[in-house]
Amino acid sequence: METRYGAFLESYNKGNVYMDKIVQGFFDKISYDLNIIINGNDPLLTGKFSPIETIIKEPYRSSYDKMIAVVNVLDDVTISMTESEYKKNVMNIIYSLLDVAKTTEDSFLMDKALKIASQIPQILGS
Amino acid sequence: MCNLLNSFLWIWPGLIGLAVGLAELLNRYKSFEKLFNWYSWIYMIINFLASVLVYFIFTIYNIKLGEIGTQKLGLILVSGISAMGFLRSSFFNYKTSNDKVIEVGPAAFLNIFLTAAQRQFDQTLSEQNLNKLEKTMEGLNFVSASKDLPIIILSSMRVLTTEEQKDLSDEILRLVNDTNTTNDVKNIALGVILLKYTGMHLLEKAVQILRNIYKKEVHKSLERINEIQQQISKIV
């Protein structure tokens, strides 16, 4: 449904070079940990993180859209890595996500990043 | 009474001219506020007088306008509308060596007053607005406000078309993507851009709402993010 601010938001997200740089920086930062997880031997984590690589490579999405898609994937991942040897790699990725949320102060990203990260203390306690 | 009305018939085409001039100014300024400066009045009076002049030319020289000219209403409409058309016409275009096209004719003359009115309007309004905007926008986080503030404003307004929303976005993005300007300056510029669509009262209200949201949510979230990052750093 077309909202009263839909056209503004679409145009804003597409043309936001500032956000592009931040998101690209985030993708660059997580690429090392992402590679380890995807090429690792935890099939559950590999399966869940693989879509991130696909999303990053998509040419037609705006950076912000890619970021949202990646966040949605991460939202579904953290609990499953409780016992994984790749815990640190996942945490590195979440740390970088928190950085993006902090830099942009984007309310959606902050909410999602906090929701994802709030599961970490439970993981650490286990 | 009837004679009196007949002798003042020339006022009506003049009013058509006045209304067209007013509509043109409103279209440029998007607001009645501070619209009526000296040049705006001169602009509207030129339109008024041109329509009256055409009316007198038609009546004094008894110019045949066909069937429509036999009715007073028809004569008034033709006078008013044709004067507006004449005033906005050009006799010819002159192209300079710099490839700049200069229109020669009444339109160019009228444009002098339109531009002067616009400049005076801008100067008067800008001075007043800048004083208020400095306080209103002070200390806002530009990165998030550049997106959140327009959303709050747009969601409360019904009249912005898709094109206007895109124009607004383009203007704001020029600020967002500029890396050579301080956030304080960007905040004021953001306020100036939004002001064109909102007026001062709505903008102040929207900023106040945004500040309350940031105070409650964003600051708390930022603190929490820092805490979690510290925890992660200890482990990783």
Image (tube, rainbow, N blue to C red):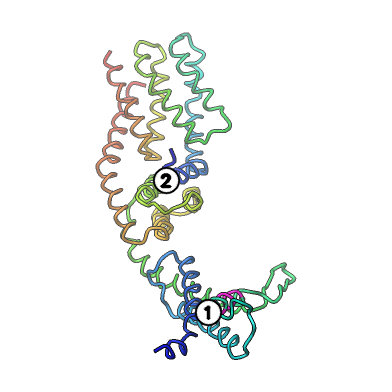
Q: What x and y, as percent, mark residue B149?
A: 37, 49
According to the picture, the residue beneath numbered tag 1 turns out to be B76
Residue B83: say if magenta. Answer: yes
Q: Main secondary structure of the magenta part?
A: helix
The segment highlighted magenta reads B79-85
Task: Specify whether B198 is left or right of B97.
Answer: left
Question: Which callout, 2 or 1, points to the residue nearer the camera?
Answer: 1
Q: Are marks 2 and 1 in contact (CB under 8 Å)?
A: no
Viewer-side residue, B218 vs B33: B33
Distance from the alpha carbon under mark 2 to that under mark 1: 44 Å
**Amino acid type of the residue that numbered disc 1 sits on in the rendered structure:** Ile
Q: Residues within 10 Å of mark 2 (few under 14, many from 20)?
A: many
Chain for numbered disc 1: B
Residue in the picture at 65% in, 78% down? B105
According to the picture, the residue beneath numbered tag 2 turns out to be A5
Q: What x and y, as percent, mark residue B46?
A: 52, 82
Residue in the picture at 46% in, 72% down? B22
Q: Residues within 10 Å of mark 1 (few under 14, many from 20)?
A: many
Quadrant (top left/top right/bottom left/bottom right) for the C terminus of chain A: top left
